[in-house]
Image (spheres, helix red, strand yellow):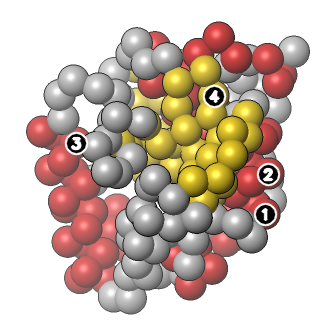
Amino acid sequence: MSHSITINGTTIETARLRLRPWRVDDAGRALDIYGEADVARWLAPAMHRIEDAEKMRTVVARWVEETAEKAGRPTGRWAIEDLSSGELIGSGQILGLPPEGEDLELGYQFAPRAWGQGRGSEAGHALAHYAFQHDEEEVFAVVRPGNHRGIRTAREIGMEWVGETTKYYDLRLQVFRLRKGDLDVASR
């Protein structure tokens, strides 16, 4: 995987992807991601399946507003586009994990048609670069047991498994961590 990453404000580009702030008119394509049961089943309780366009539009509008209000830490949500086609194929996040928001979580979801092509690890790697460029020292991925795709992606990013916890979301989760100094170790 190429790790060529360009960060321009809140837009991040990799060899194949553009991560950019969400726009309200992205809601229809967002529904292709968050309306899919195979995507949403791993997101609850933080997010549940969105079943209609109007609800998705409300959620995306909230994300746009949250991004506009953001200050301080490098948190946010990004729409992920395929660079060659311009098609919106995924979503990426850096968000504070509950209960206190001290630990930052990398998250990424893709429409099923974009699965199995290494885009999750490419997006996660880019988000880690963004966080580390903004003075964070570590980021986490939390994955439900049984989410083999999520576990594999965390490892492809170069994240280290640090154990299981119920600290976040009151669920038993696998925890993976990436420290700033280890960002590119996996690709060497």
Residue 22 x, y percent position in the rendering: 32, 50
Q: Which quarter of the rendered picture does the N terminus lie within?
A: top right
Farthest residue, direction bottom: 51
Calculate the distance from the C-alpha at mark 4 to the C-alpha at mark 2.
14 Å
- Residue at numbered disc 4: 178
Rounded to the nearest whole Å, what is the CA distance between mark 2 and mark 1?
6 Å
Residue at figure coordinates x 72%, y 23% from the top left: 3
Residue 56 seen in the figure? yes
Q: Amino acid at mark 1?
A: His
- Image-based side of 9 in relation to 153, left or right: left
Task: Tell me the tag on residue 99.
Answer: none
Dot 4 surroundings within 10 Å: few (below 14), some, or many (20 or more)? many
Residue 53 in percent (x, y) is at 31, 82
Relative to 176, is 32 above or below? below
Helix, strand or loop at label 1? It is: helix
The residue positioned 47% from the left and 42% from the top of the image is: 105
Q: CA distance from mark 4 to mark 1?
A: 18 Å
Task: State which tag comes first along the sequence, 4 or 1.
Answer: 1
Q: Residues within 10 Å of mark 1 (few under 14, many from 20)?
A: few
